[in-house]
Amino acid sequence: MSSLDRFAQHKLDDLKRRNLYRSMAETLREDGIWVERAGRRLLSFSCNDYLNLTQHPAIKQAAQAAIEKYGAGSGASRLVTGNHPLYAALESRLAAVKQAEAACVFGSGYLANAGIIPVLAGPDDLVIADELSHACLFAGAQLSRGKVLTFRHNDLDHLRTLLAGHRAAYPHVLIVTDGVFSMDGDLAPLGDLNALADEFDAWLMTDDAQGLGVMGGGRGSSFSGNSQVPVPLQMGTLSKAIGSYGGYICGSAPVIDLIRNRARTVVYSTGLPPSSVAASIAALDLIEREPAYATLPVQKARAFTHRAGLPAAQSPIVPVIVGDEQKALDASRLLADEGYLAAAIRPPTVPKGTARLRLTFTAQHPDDAIERLADIVRDRILVH
Ligand SMILES: *Cc1c(COP(=O)(O)O)cnc(C)c1O
């Protein structure tokens, strides 16, 4: 065995010993909710396809038409020749949805965060992140080569203490947080965060990957009714409720122009395939036409938490925390035997001691299947 293979095998053995080894199970997604895995048909509560748009006929049709018209790939980075005409349409749609001046689309949400943060913060600057922020916000923060601090989850007092203690030492301070936390399903206090950022002349950036399409009437977690928290940097993904692929940021015209010029994941990475961009546009059309449809995932999640005796869901994401890695795997297996797909989420994706099932509710989940799932979770998983 070469030293390289020995290195890999040693790391793998260690992961297995700690119940942290992962494998990719081949999964055939038949429609918006059913999947086939190892010959079994399971009702999935693990997809982020909240509005089941990955399989929507009109959206698939839009993607196919884009392939016919513009080809399968974009052929270069957007600044060279990859900026096909669908990009401008998508970016003006996104800016309108977020009530921002402009938008810039990236290859994915991860690429967006890896590109945006180093544009806004450099080695002399400070990035402060909620401790439960998505991994790619931390990746972007590391790439900035600035100082990175974390505040306790949703703890405004702790954030204030950090700002009071550190603000003066840095030319610029960027505060980053998820809008909807991806593994806990709770919401950031965006109004208070925005006010605190203003008070200290810090810049607030929200990652609303899990909010677009399902919160705030489909506009995301900084919207509620007719009011909006004016977050200056609103980032998100097109790969969850939108059902396609890609990431984006909305903001003021100069900020977006700077990002187009300087974000390395835009400059040095190929543009999205036209089909992905077309699918996103079609999905945003659909959400705008049917805003009531966008409220269904949260309603379904609430019906579940009510029946299971859990705290009321704030988003379509409901964590069922069991603590131990092995227990999470056992709970996932028990649900598979009952016909449900509910993936076990383990460290380092979540903090140690909080291994869980992460359930996600989508518009088309049947109510009776949700009730039965709630009964199983209440009577056979949470009792231990
Ligand atoms: C999924 C997710 C991302 C990554 O988006 P991709 O488009 O899948 O790369 C970023 N942030 C949060 C909060 C997410 O949930």
Image (cartoon, rainbow, N blue to C red):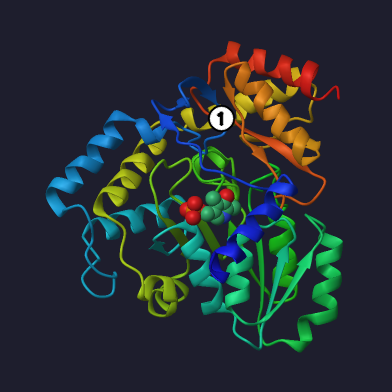
Residue depicted at x 74% and y 21%: 377
Q: Position of residue 30 (x, y in %)?
A: 38, 26
Say whether mark 1 is within 8 Å of ligand 1: no
Residue sitting at the far left: 69
Foreground of the two, 140 or 332: 332
Residue 87 appears in view: yes
On the picture, is 81 further left or further right than 27?
Answer: left
Residue depicted at x 80% and y 66%: 159
Amino acid type, label 1: Pro
Foreground of the two, 116 or 173: 116
Q: Position of residue 66 (x, y in %)?
A: 19, 47
Residue bearing mark 1 = 297
Rendering quarter of residue 82: bottom left
Position of the N terminus, as image quadrant, is bottom right
Secondary structure under the numbered disc 1 in the rendered image: helix
Residue sitting at the far front: 1
Q: Position of residue 105 (x, y in %)?
A: 39, 61
Rendering quarter of residue 88: bottom left
Residue 320 appears in view: no
Q: Is residue 40 above or below residue 248?
A: above
